[in-house]
Amino acid sequence: MVWGVLEEMRIRSLGVIDDAVVELSPGFTAVTGETGAGKTMVVTSLGLLLGGRADPALVRIGAASAVVEGRISVPPGAPAAVRAEEAGAELDEGVLLVSRTVSAEGRSRAHLGGRSVPVGLLAELADELVAVHGQTDQQGLLKPARQRGALDRYAGEAVSVPLAAYGEAYRRLRAVTAELDEITTRARERAQEADLLRFGLEEVEAVAPLPGEDAELAAEAERLGHAEALASAAALAHAALAGSPEDPESVDATTLVAGAGRALEAVRSHDPALAALADRMGEISILLADVATELAGYADDLDADPLRLAAVEERRAALTQLIRKYGDGEGTAAVLAWAEQSAARLGELDNDDDRIGELTAERDRLRDELSALAQRLTDARTEAADRFAAAVTAELASLAMPHARVSFSLAQTEDPEGVEVGGRRVAYGPSGADEVELLLAPHPGAPPRPIAKGASGGELSRVMLAVEVVFAGVDPVPTYLFDEVDAGVGGKAAVEIGRRLAKLARTAQVVVVTHLPQVAAFADRQLLVEKTNDGSVTRSGVTVLEGEERVRELSRMLAGQEDSETARAHAEELLAAARADG
């Protein structure tokens, strides 16, 4: 099932390419050209479209920015189409437009279906759309971790399901072990911390502060410290408002305002404006009477008690000490918050023995769980390894390595502190306990050796291609891009690689950057990346080769001479053989 086809790319101001349109075939497209012509720019362009790192050095000298645009045919409902629509992108009759701009200053912008999107979204789509393989990927296949990843990918849910459970248990075990180590190795520090917390809580409990008590006591201390002045002021104000019994001749404000009110009341009926003033004067008279009454009560209630003042100041001193030590100067509320948090922490520290028992039990349970899951992973990998190796071996037979044999070595390293697998205690990590290594026996009688040691460059290229072809049957992607997957290969092996890529192109889109005519001859479409030089500027363009032009290019690739009759005959023979094979 094909989930998407890359129809076309337009490359502007990228490296040696000034402005080129790359038209791709739904089947097998070969990209050829002389060394240094910019064939890798095609791979680089696709990498940028799929969220690769933007390097400002890629921008053509003299240009403000480099732009790569692509048209990808994506059927409705395909995973890439669903993800793009979730991001707000729009499909134009089943075509998804993707663009990436890289400025000479290093800024990068991405657009998907007419909508500006994060570059990371393009990388997400890449997982659904394209598998890119180059010489760097070949070297990556030499790493045991990549080999284990390839095996796990081939095994599918038989490994992915227990591996997900294993990963969760592994992370939890690390957390539990770290906490247990922290408690046991820092027992002395934790005991000292508990003593300090206990002492502080006893101090707080002895004083027993109340929320807001410090502010209330400050106000009371201020009032008691100035009680005589407050009482004198209240008495003077009361006498001014209501008069003094000791001086019957004194004139007070209440009497004066009352007289003013009576004068207005006598004539208010003659003018509404004056009536309004009379009403206001009545309000003033009532307000003065109320204030005078309250002043009398205030003076009577005011208690200048030196003993109470001393008690208040003593209480404030105790609270101030607590606030300075435990409240960061923020008041009794902060002290109470500290006490609450410290009590909880003290409970944790005092329960260390119980916690150690709980953590030890959980650690042992998790180790048992990991042992069971690691055993499941080993069993699933062992079963998948046989099938995977047999499938890759069969593919190598189609790639001019009929006597080669591929196998997997699954081993574990004994560790008394590890998990139990196969009745032994073995070391374990985030992916299980298995050490996976891909082995190759290139011919009968040769012992299987790790491909990092026993495979030549050409053999490694074919092993990687065989692995990818096997993946195409169990975990396909719409488009495969191979950058010189045929490096180090020639002769019959090159023909077989071309034939195998053509077979892969029957179910997926295949784009190959190649220098071998035997491979290019099998392509449905051949593109030529060709550079020109006007004496000052070097440019590269991309041309679709058809008919005589394709024969000439294959002749050049064969013999370095486009017009060699022998090379032309060989090129035509290659094309005819490829068509017959198809």
Image (cartoon, grey):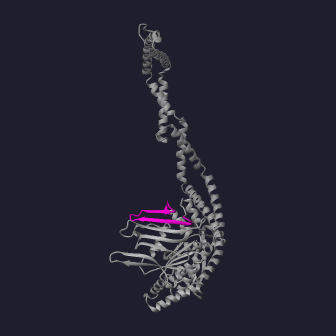
Q: Could you say which is closer to the camera, residue 28 or residue 407?
A: 28
Residue 363 picture quarter: bottom right
**Which residue does the image show at 46% across and 86% down from the upper left?**
552
Q: Is residue 380 left or right of residue 542?
A: right
For this orientation, the residue located farthest to the top is 249
Q: Which residues are magenta?
A: 92-119
Above or below — where is 493 with respect to 415? below
Q: Is residue 313 visible?
A: no
In the picture, the quarter occupied by the N terminus is: bottom right
In the image, 96 versus 441, the foreground residue is 96
Up/down of 305 relative to 424, above or below: above
The image quadrant where one finds the C terminus is bottom right
- Establish if 280 lies above or below 77: above
Spot the residue most to the bottom.
Answer: 566
Residue at the (43%, 20%) spot, across then down: 228
Whether 97 is among the magenta residues is yes
Residue placed furthest toward the left: 536
Residue 102, quarter of picture: bottom left
Is any part of residue 159 visible from this angle?
yes
Q: Position of residue 547 (x, y in %)?
A: 49, 84
Q: Whole-percent x and y of residue 560?
A: 43, 87
Q: Is residue 12 magenta?
A: no
Vertical position of residue 569 compared to residue 384: above or below = below
